[in-house]
């Protein structure tokens, strides 16, 4: 991680106030980037922003519902007013409040999941891409999930929203590649987070997740940061439109 230098870069991370997003913000700061922390609760965003500043980097905390296009417009406006450019966009915010069959999915929950997991990342990236192009390009990373590549029945619609985002990642890469904007996806397997630990309260969930990997363990959040830094940096300068899987071998079984 220390060999990656993001000095002079500005990174925007949605869902940046806790879990993987928080770890991303701190990892990006360690690599030299200034960071924009976006999430629902401003107080939590500011807590992470303070940790970024303690590392000697600039930080901006913004409260926004990432499924709301109007809120995302304000995120873009505040970010560019503060920094003048954004070089790295990480669409990390996501949600999965339901474990169960599709027949139990309500229309309201369908819309909520789609808005946050698919519509929000598409909207934010598509509105920021022209601005990135004017400043010479950048890197966009859409955080999906191995569930989008190998859908389990109990995560059916969550998997569908992430699969849709993977497809959008490829289209974004094709459309924006000529403008020096790279767009890739990261598909993590199971790692300790609020989302996973909440689901692990269901009997057998954690044991099943462990047994579904080759390495027979759940990753720590920090282990997902190195792939993010690779995709954010010039080390992946000739990589676009791909999905990097970090899953402990889940996809092999």
Image (cartoon, grey):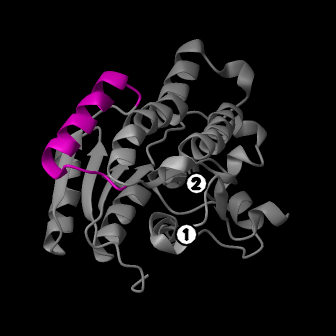
Q: Quadrant of the N terminus?
A: bottom left
Query: Mark number for residue 67?
Result: none
Disc nearer the start of the sequence (2/1): 2
Which residue ends up furthest to the right in the rendered image?
253
> In the rendering, at what x and y percent does residue 3 appear?
42, 86
* Left or right placement of residue 5 versus residue 229 in this view: left
Mark 2 highlights which residue?
Answer: 184
Q: Quadrant of the C terminus?
A: bottom right
Pick the residue in front: 126 or 178: 178
Pick the residue in front: 248 or 202: 248
In the image, what residue occupies the spot 48% across and 52% down? 181
Residue 241 magenta-highlighted: no
Q: Main secondary structure of the magenta part?
A: helix
Task: Please tell me whether mark 1 sits on a helix, a strand or a loop.
Answer: helix
> In the rendering, at what x and y percent does residue 243 appear?
66, 56
Residue 217: in sight, yes or no? yes
Residue 83 magenta-highlighted: yes
Mark 1 highlights which residue?
Answer: 236
> In the rendering, at what x and y percent does residue 188 appear?
60, 59
Residues drawn in magenta: 67-87
In the image, what residue occupies the spot 59% across and 13% down? 107
Q: Is residue 46 above or below residue 218?
A: above
Task: Please tell me whether mark 2 sits on a helix, a strand or a loop.
Answer: strand
Q: Quadrant of residue 103?
A: top right
Residue 143: in sight, yes or no? no
Discs 2, 1 touching: Cβ within 8 Å: yes
Q: How many residues crowd mark 1 within 10 Å: few (<14), some (14–19), many (20+)? A: some
In the image, what residue occupies the spot 42% across and 41% down? 129
In the image, what residue occupies the spot 53% across and 19% down? 111
Q: Is residue 43 above or below residue 223?
A: above
């Amino acid at each position: 991680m220390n060999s990656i230098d993001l000095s002079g870069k500005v990174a925007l991370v949605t869902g940046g106030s806790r879990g993987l997003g928080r770890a991303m913000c701190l990892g990006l700061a360690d690599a030299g980037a200034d960071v924009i922390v976006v999430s629902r609760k401003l107080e939590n965003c500011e807590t992470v922003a303070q940790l970024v500043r303690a590392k000697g980097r600039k930080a901006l905390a913004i409260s926004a519902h990432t499924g709301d296009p109007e809120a995302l417009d304000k995120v873009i406006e505040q970010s560019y007013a503060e920094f003048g450019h954004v070089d790295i966009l990480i669409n990390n915010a996501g949600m999965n409040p339901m474990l169960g069959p599709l027949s139990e999915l309500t229309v309201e929950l369908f819309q909520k999941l789609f808005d946050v997991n698919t519509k929000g990342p598409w909207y934010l990236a598509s509105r920021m891409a022209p601005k990135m192009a004017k400043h010479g390009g950048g890197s966009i990373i859409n955080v999906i999930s191995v569930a989008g590549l190998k859908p389990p029945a109990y995560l059916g619609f969550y998997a569908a929203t992430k699969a849709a985002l993977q497809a959008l990642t490829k289209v974004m890469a094709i459309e924006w590649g000529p403008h020096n904007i790279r767009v890739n996806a990261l598909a993590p397997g199971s790692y300790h987070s609020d989302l996973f630990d909440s689901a692990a309260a269901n009997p057998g969930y954690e044991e099943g997740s462990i047994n579904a990997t080759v390495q027979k363990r759940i990753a720590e959040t920090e282990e997902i940061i190195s792939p993010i830094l690779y995709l954010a940096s010039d080390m992946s300068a000739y990589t676009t439109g791909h999905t990097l899987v970090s899953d402990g071998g889940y996809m092999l079984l």
